[in-house]
């Protein structure tokens, strides 16, 4: 349980019971919102999820946790893997090289948009949208095999059971023509770092990694804890890179809802169309959520509702002291 109610980050004078009540209310709000959303179906395998499912898992530095609902259900990470890809690129190739292939600007467009890629810029706007992640994966694909990235994902999420969801992967392969189009457009502009087919295969595999709300809380706390795994003290990523990732999550992590999420919730977060949401919360805390019913932006409707309540009631907005 999260017990230290006086840690920096949680609003003062809240008892453990108060905090648990806030999470309980958030869970109920999320559950109530779920029927107004819809599971993604453009990747047919994702439409098989139960839209009423919802889970929240919060984790602190001492390993104390708070779990509500479906926290062990496995789902594909989808765009949340973009955070891992960016982390690997920064760790092994550095800041300058990473951002010679992708920019760090919010796009204001949907996650799979191809529009501005051909009009405004040759380089994708940021690594949190499909075009930017495809570019970053491409950049890594000559040096790293999927098995390497899988291993990094397990470490970053503190979850040795993360594996490839074969059914989702095949479903993506069958229906991912827009992503192929993005890769080939980047190739035609002479900016894609490696072979488009190899790139897309690795991108689909990363999107098809199966996680749970609990694994996302693990990823959240490593980011919240400046790149250090608080349980084995392993320094996974330098603080300057973690700052970079959290800034990009804050400005771009929720697609074209990032601005409003920043105002309403104010926490670095990344969503995926599988229904996952990872939040890196000051304190530090990691919060992972899962609710496959999505809003029109492709974010989990239950998770967004719940985080709005949690952030507001516990004073977790980064611009609230
Ligand atoms: N695999 C998905 C896609 O490429 C990832 C998108 C997402 O989670 N928003 O369309």
Image: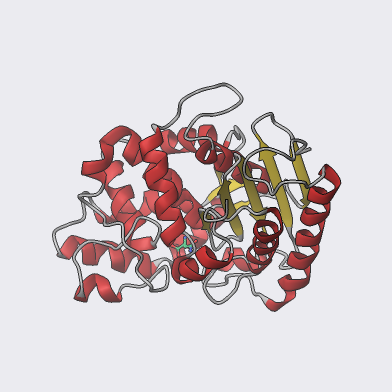
In the rendered structure, the answer to whether residue 198 lies left or right of residue 319 reads left
Q: Picture coordinates of residue 254 (x, y %)?
A: 49, 63
In the rendered structure, the answer to whether residue 184 lies left or right of residue 85 reads left
Q: How many marks?
A: 0
In the rendered structure, the answer to whether residue 221 lies left or right of residue 104 reads right
Q: Which residue is located at x 78 percent, y 56 percent?
A: 22
Q: Picture coordinates of residue 292 (x, y %)?
A: 65, 64
- Colour theme: secondary structure
Q: Which residue lies furthest to the left in this view?
A: 190
Q: Picture coordinates of residue 20 (x, y %)?
A: 81, 49
Q: Which residue is located at x 69 percent, y 57 percent?
A: 310
Q: Picture coordinates of residue 105 (x, y %)?
A: 31, 62
Q: Nearer the viewer, residue 68 or 315?
A: 315
Q: Which of 147 and 120 is in front in this view?
A: 120
**Which quadrant, please, contains the N terminus?**
top right
Q: Is residue 126 visible?
A: yes
Q: Which residue is located at x 66 percent, y 65 percent?
A: 48
Q: Which of 110 and 135 is in front in this view?
A: 110
Q: Residue furthest right?
A: 17
Image quadrant assignment for residue 294 = bottom right
Q: Can residue 169 be seen in this view?
A: no
């Amino acid at each position: 349980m999260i017990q230290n109610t006086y840690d920096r980050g949680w609003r003062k004078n809240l008892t453990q019971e108060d905090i648990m009540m806030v999470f309980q209310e958030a869970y109920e709000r999320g559950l109530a919102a779920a029927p107004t959303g819809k599971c993604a179906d453009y990747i047919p395998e994702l439409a098989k999820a139960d839209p009423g499912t919802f889970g929240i898992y919060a984790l602190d530095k001492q390993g104390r946790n708070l779990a509500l609902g479906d926290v062990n259900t496995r789902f594909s990470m989808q765009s949340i893997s973009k955070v891992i890809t960016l982390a690997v690129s920064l760790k092994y190739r550095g800041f300058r090289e990473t951002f010679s292939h992708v920019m760090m600007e919010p796009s204001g467009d949907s996650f799979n948009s191809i529009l501005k890629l051909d009009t405004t810029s040759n380089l994708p706007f940021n690594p949190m949208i499909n075009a930017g992640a495809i570019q970053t994966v491409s950049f890594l694909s000559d040096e790293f095999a999927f098995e390497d990235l899988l291993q990094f994902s397990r470490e970053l999420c503190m979850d040795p059971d993360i594996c490839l969801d074969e059914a989702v992967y095949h479903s993506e392969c069958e229906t991912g023509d827009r992503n192929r189009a993005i890769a080939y457009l980047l190739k035609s502009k002479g900016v894609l770092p490696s072979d488009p087919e190899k790139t897309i295969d690795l991108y689909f595999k990363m999107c098809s990694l199966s996680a749970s709300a609990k694994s996302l809380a693990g990823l959240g706390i490593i980011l919240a804890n400046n790149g250090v795994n608080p349980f084995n003290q392993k320094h996974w990523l330098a603080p300057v890179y973690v700052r970079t990732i959290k800034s990009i999550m804050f400005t771009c992590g929720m697609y074209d809802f990032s601005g409003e999420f920043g105002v309403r919730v104010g926490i670095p977060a990344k969503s995926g169309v599988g229904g996952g949401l990872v939040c890196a919360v000051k304190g530090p805390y990691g919060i992972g959520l899962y609710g496959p019913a999505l809003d029109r932006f492709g974010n989990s409707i239950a998770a967004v509702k719940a985080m709005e309540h949690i952030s507001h009631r516990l004073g977790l907005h980064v611009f609230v002291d």
